[in-house]
Image (spheres, helix red, strand yellow):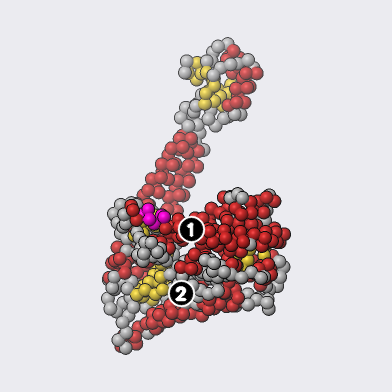
Amino acid sequence: MKTKWWHNGFVYLILLVAILTLVLVFLPRGGPENVASIDEFITQAKQGQIDTIQQDPSHNSVIGLKDGQAVIKTGFDGSTIELRNYFKDEGVNLPIDVKPSGTDWGMIALQIILPMVLLGALFYFLFRSARGAGTQAFNFGKSRARLSSDNKSTVTFADVAGVEEAKEEVQEVVEFLKSPQKFRTLGGRIPRGVLLVGPPGTGKTLLAKAIAGEAKAPFYSISGSEFVEMFVGVGAARVRDLFEQAKRNAPCIVFMDEIDAVGRHRGAGLGGGHDEREQTLNQILAEMDGFDTNTNIIVLAATNRPDILDPALLRPGRFDRHIIVDLPDVNGRKAILEVHAKAKPLAKDVNLETIAKETPGFSGADLANLLNEAAILAARHNRKDISSKELEEATDRVIAGPEKKSRVISQREKEIIAHHESGHALTAKMLPNADPVHKVSIIARGAIGGWTRFLPTEDRYLWTRSQFDDRLAVMLGGRTAEEISFGEITTGAQNDLAEATKLARRMVTEYGMSDKLGPRTFGQRQELVFLGREISEQRDYSDKIAQEIDEEVHNIIQHAYNTAKKILTKNKAKLKEIAEQLIAHETLEEEELNKLFEGLRPQPASS
Ligand code: ADP
Ligand code: MG
Ligand code: ZN
């Protein structure tokens, strides 16, 4: 399908311009014919026969002028400053200006004609292709959809783990692609458009490739950013071309990755109502409506923002089938780790189940990344296999970024950070509904000075009020510890405070956990679609309620603060002990922490 380069008009144009330029540059130049010696030049200048000196722009000759008339020319090779100094040394103090000595065609060609020709050519090609007039010059408008059937998608369902429900649901799509006829006679309703929905990195793209691999069907993919082109109409032309190719090769899969880039609510773009995105979206809708019952094409799309999609995309006959690809639970994580560990030599002490337990909230991509980081670390340690030490370090890296050992921290700062982190750890230990502490460290990572890692005992889908209260107390434990140990607070708690405030607010406005305001929600969150971010909240309550919400948020946080303060004041000696150990060792693992915690009994916050 590739256009041969000599069929491409643009190549000839470049050649033409290049030849023209060469000819013009080497054309003989004009100017006074009689070239005098520099001594003669100086003599004339001293005699007052010259009133201005003009330097040739190519810096290899100078001309003497009298009343604007060129009277003498001599060779001079050097910069204007050199020229000035030379004449000064000779006792000539005339003004020097730099001007072309007559019409220099080469210079004009270089400075004016060449850019104009190039610009003209560029515009010509841009407009031609933007109108989709079928030029092959830049291959604009041709969908860059990649046909992956030559190098068949080698991904299979075995490569996708931890999303069993989604795999079962797409099984039907595979069956259809394998034998559309058989599927029809059995009266199966053919899925037309299937939307894979889920957070980033959960394997949506991977799953789409696996469907193609399993069905051994051609696979045409195009991704969000590729739809949205700089020139109006190109995105739509790409879509048209993509479906044309697909129809010729049916049964097959058309996969539109990150469709939210183009499929946002129409009329919400920054560029007004009729922007490029809208045309592309309309084209997608038109293509999908144009399928008749015999079209054996399945259109897959993936997004992590189904909430912002244009409703028209989700209507029956379009993407009416939604498959959720969610973050994996602990078993899913273990299965994903197993898939990615297959090609990596693991040491005997590695237990993938433990890692799965330690990584709640990790996506499939995070887990793949984790094993990759561990492999790199193992190589750096000159190991032949990956041990649990590297995996542990890799987990910290994926969560918080690489260690910043080079950052210089004063002893005083180190003490404050140590007390802060010990405060988190100790409050967590003493509260029955808080997650157990897994690790505490005062080695800086990324932007943070120290950190405490918790290990939830299970994947959580529901949270209780007591869990939230204890969690808030743990968040505030860092700052409270600074206060108790040093009588002073630092900026180090900024992030904790922001998180705590956010959580407390959600407890009141979204989860109905405030006794005073009762079981209802407050405010309708809205987002500005073109920014893709939640930036405004529509108030559906009065100013009085707003004040009450603020008060309730304040109360909840104050309560948590009091809890933390009570615990840490009571166990001040322990706090100091942990902080000292932390300063000495920089990182405390679960076992060391448990030794330090020995004898401590968690107590409900109220007692
Ligand atoms: P998404 O498209 O949902 O953002 P990707 O499919 O691009 O995520 O996933 C990126 C990478 O993460 C994959 O190539 C794969 O290596 C890994 N990965 C993600 N999810 C899974 C999974 N469920 N099973 C195995 N590997 C996964
Ligand atoms: Mg993806
Ligand atoms: Zn903190």
Give the position of the C terminus as an image quadrant.
bottom right
Q: In the orientation shown, which residue stands out farthest toward the front?
A: 607
Q: Which residue is mark 2?
A: 207
Please state the extent of the stretch shown in magenta in the rendering. 546-551
Q: Are marks 2 and 1 in contact (CB under 8 Å)?
A: no
Image coordinates of residue 201 in percent, x first then y, are 49, 68
Looking at the image, residue 472 lies above or below residue 17:
below
Image coordinates of residue 423 in percent, x first then y, are 61, 60
Residue type at mark 1? Answer: Ile
Q: Is residue 173 visible?
A: yes
Given residues 358 and 108, the one toward you in this image is: 358
Give the position of the N terminus as an image quadrant.
bottom left
Residue behind label 2 places its C-beta within 8 angstroms of ligand 1: yes
Image coordinates of residue 370 in percent, x first then y, are 59, 68
Residue at 41% across / 55% down in the picture?
Answer: 551
Q: Marks 2 and 1, how far apart in space? A: 43 Å
Residue type at mark 2? Answer: Leu
Residue at 46% across / 80% down in the picture?
Answer: 164
Given residues 560 and 218, the one toward you in this image is: 560
Residue 484 sits inside the magenta stretch: no
Q: Which residue is mark 1?
A: 557
